[in-house]
Amino acid sequence: MNSTELIKGTLTTIILKLLADNGKMYGYEITQRVKELSDNKILIKEGSLYPALHKLLKDGLVQVETVNIGKRIRKYYSITKQGELKKQVQSDELKEFLQTIHGMIFPQQDLLSNDVG
Amino acid sequence: MNSTELIKGTLTTIILKLLADNGKMYGYEITQRVKELSDNKILIKEGSLYPALHKLLKDGLVQVETVNIGKRIRKYYSITKQGELKKQVQSDELKEFLQTIHGMIFPQQDLLSNDVG
DNA sequence: TTCAATACATAGATTTGTGATGTATTAAAA
DNA sequence: TTTTAATACATCACAAATCTATGTATTGAA
């Protein structure tokens, strides 16, 4: 997640969305899935992800289940009911923000187009 | 600009874009224009704007011209050639980011739609 | 057997924007 | 006429979020 400074404020929304869609995921899996879904554009660093997950846990938005895979540990995270609510609010806010910024910086342009501004 | 944490990293892009479009603008005018263009959704605080302008100035991306309006001071900022280049790069990055995030959080949805996710 | 990938974690530094505060002019309202 | 709101600049201490660097350890592939 070093390519831009733009990700700030979207990380927890991304995590909650992924957990809402996929049921259970563990940390490393989340980083890989984000990388894949963003076509290598968003690379979440471990130093960002784990603190973010711990905060979500502390805030009751996700819950965790530790599983042993051989001698290796995996912590599966899943979203809570409270997390679902939060996800919805944050998604709505994010969408409004995307629309607002897009309208300001790229007026009269469709988001999916590749027009030269 | 307190409504979301999402603005991080977009402020200088917004400023450069406004200056590129409008020639000269002074600080207070920028805050008002952003408020207006964003339909009151993005409220740039003075504590954010002035340091941002000073940094842009220091980096040679904008230039300044001080004007006296009666006994009141106005500092008109305009974009430099270097600032134009930067604006272009940042706009392109921002657009790609908007597309990426939108595609991740709202798949199969048009940005301008108001579908319930 | 060595390297890359998997899998967790934390600490310190950095960046960015906010809130609070300050000074001062001008115009409108009470 | 006095008070308030708007205009217009500015800075500083603070908080929040992420990154860099670093650490440990397992597993599979070269």
Image (cartoon, coloured by chain):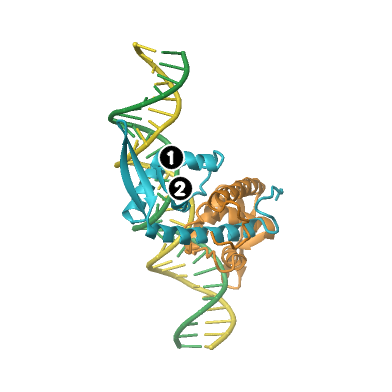
Chain colours: A orange, B cyan, C green, D yellow
Residue B22, which numbered label? Answer: 2
Q: Is residue B69 above or below residue A115?
A: above
Q: Are marks 1 and 2 on the same chain?
A: yes
Chain containing the residue with disc 2: B
**Residue type pointed to by label 2:** Asn
> Residue at left 52%, top 63%?
A44
- As displayed, is residue A20 above or below residue A29? above
Task: State the separation of the CA atoms marked 1 and 2.
Answer: 11 Å
Q: In the picture provided, is A34 more to the left or to the right than C13? A: right
Element type where label 1 sits in the image? helix
The 10 Å Cα crowd at callout 1, few under 14, some 14 to 19, many 20 or more, is few
Q: Is residue B111 visible?
A: yes
Q: Are marks 1 and 2 in contact (CB under 8 Å)?
A: no
Q: Residue B117 appears at what percent x and percent y?
A: 70, 51
Secondary-structure class at tag 2: helix
Mark 1 vs 2, N-terminal side: 2
Does the rendering let one see residue B43? no
Percent from the top left, x then y, of residue C16?
A: 42, 51
**Labelled disc at residue B29:** 1
**Which numbered disc covers residue A99?**
none
- Which amino acid is tagged 1? Glu
Position of residue B50 measured from the top left corner of the image (x, y, whole percent):
37, 44
Residue at the (31%, 42%) spot, across then down: B66
In the picture, measured across the screen, residue A64 lies left or right of residue B12, that is: right
Q: Chain of mark 1?
A: B
